[in-house]
Image: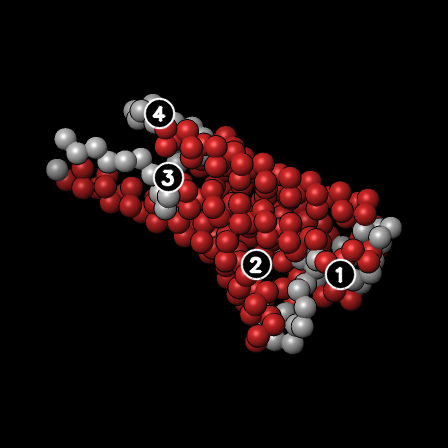
């Protein structure tokens, strides 16, 4: 009886962690953007979510990323792959938070590719961490969330959840690829498109896909129906 209670409590903890991660992922771009406008002197959307580090929302930005990192570190899945992915996401999230987009990046908002390379190692760590973070999130959605516990039956609801996980994973990868294409091939020659904040919106879409994936994993929707014996 005791072991069954512990097992039930453990499941509740895991589900709570998944939901918390999902909520934080969805909330991050909304909170920093709205907060910077209402509480600070930002009158427009920043070109990237990372640049909110240089606004009045700095502590919130770092706090949400740090909380997400800790939740990912504490997360346990079915096997060692979940653990490795969780630790990787933990490291990369902290890399984004503590190796931030510096003020130099805002001053040089019209830089070209050559100027991007002069910003320094902090920016390099930030960009690499961000790219690897999103790739890790995509990997979790595509290859870990879609696994089925051998002890459980593969249900129609599980099939639907897997479809959602894959869609979210592909959206994350697609958003990352579009950001890379924009930064490497479009922005250097057509910087006027920056007024539409494509990087901010693509990052937001990736985070929303990530958040939805974790909320579904947290049994917010598309749950298996309980069978009463």
How many numbered markers are drawn?
A: 4
Looking at the rendering, in which quadrant would you find the C terminus? Answer: top left
Residue 141 percent across, percent down from the top left = 50, 36
Q: Are marks 1 and 4 in contact (CB under 8 Å)?
A: no
Q: Are marks 4 and 2 in contact (CB under 8 Å)?
A: no
Q: Residue at x 53, y 58 (%)?
A: 28
**Viewer-proximal residue among 88 and 22:** 22
Q: Are marks 1 and 3 in contact (CB under 8 Å)?
A: no
Indicate the secondary structure of the residue bearing disc 2. Answer: helix
Label whose residue precedes the other's in the sequence (1 or 4): 4
Label whose residue precedes the other's in the sequence (4 or 3): 4
Residue 209 in view, yes or no: yes
Which of the two marks, 4 or 3, is nearer to us in this view? 3
Label whose residue precedes the other's in the sequence (1 or 3): 1
Q: Disc number at residue 195?
A: 1
**Viewer-proximal residue among 62 and 226:** 226
Q: Residues within 10 Å of mark 3 (few under 14, many from 20)?
A: some
Label whose residue precedes the other's in the sequence (4 or 2): 2
Distance between mark 2 and mark 3 Cα atoms = 25 Å
Label whose residue precedes the other's in the sequence (2 or 3): 2
Which of the two marks, 2 or 1, is nearer to us in this view? 1
Q: Residue at x 58, y 47 (%)?
A: 206
Which residue is outermost to the left? 1
Query: Badge 4 is on which residue?
Result: 154
Residue 227 percent across, percent down from the top left = 21, 32
Q: In which quadrant of the rendered view does residue 110 lie? A: bottom right
Query: Badge 2 is on which residue?
Result: 29
Q: Disc number at residue 222?
A: 3
């Amino acid at each position: 009886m005791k072991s069954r209670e512990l097992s039930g409590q453990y499941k509740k903890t895991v589900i709570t962690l998944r939901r918390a991660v999902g909520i934080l992922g969805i909330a991050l771009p909304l909170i920093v953007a709205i907060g910077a406008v209402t509480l600070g002197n930002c009158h427009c959307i920043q070109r990237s979510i990372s640049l909110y580090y240089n606004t009045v929302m700095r502590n919130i930005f770092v706090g949400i990323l740090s909380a997400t990192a800790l939740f990912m570190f504490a997360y346990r899945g079915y096997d060692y792959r979940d653990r490795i992915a969780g630790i990787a996401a933990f490291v990369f999230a902290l890399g984004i938070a503590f190796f931030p987009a510096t003020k130099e990046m805002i001053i040089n908002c019209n830089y070209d590719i050559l100027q991007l390379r002069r910003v320094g190692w902090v920016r390099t760590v930030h960009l690499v961490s961000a790219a690897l973070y999103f790739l890790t999130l995509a990997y979790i959605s595509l290859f870990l969330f879609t696994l089925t516990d051998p002890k459980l039956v593969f249900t129609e609801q599980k099939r639907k959840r897997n479809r959602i996980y894959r869609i979210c994973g592909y959206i994350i990868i697609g958003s990352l690829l579009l950001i890379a294409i924009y930064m490497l091939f479009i922005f250097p020659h057509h910087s006027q498109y920056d007024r539409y904040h494509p990087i901010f919106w693509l990052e937001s879409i990736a985070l929303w896909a990530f958040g939805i994936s974790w909320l579904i994993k947290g049994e917010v929707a598309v749950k298996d129906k309980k069978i009463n014996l």
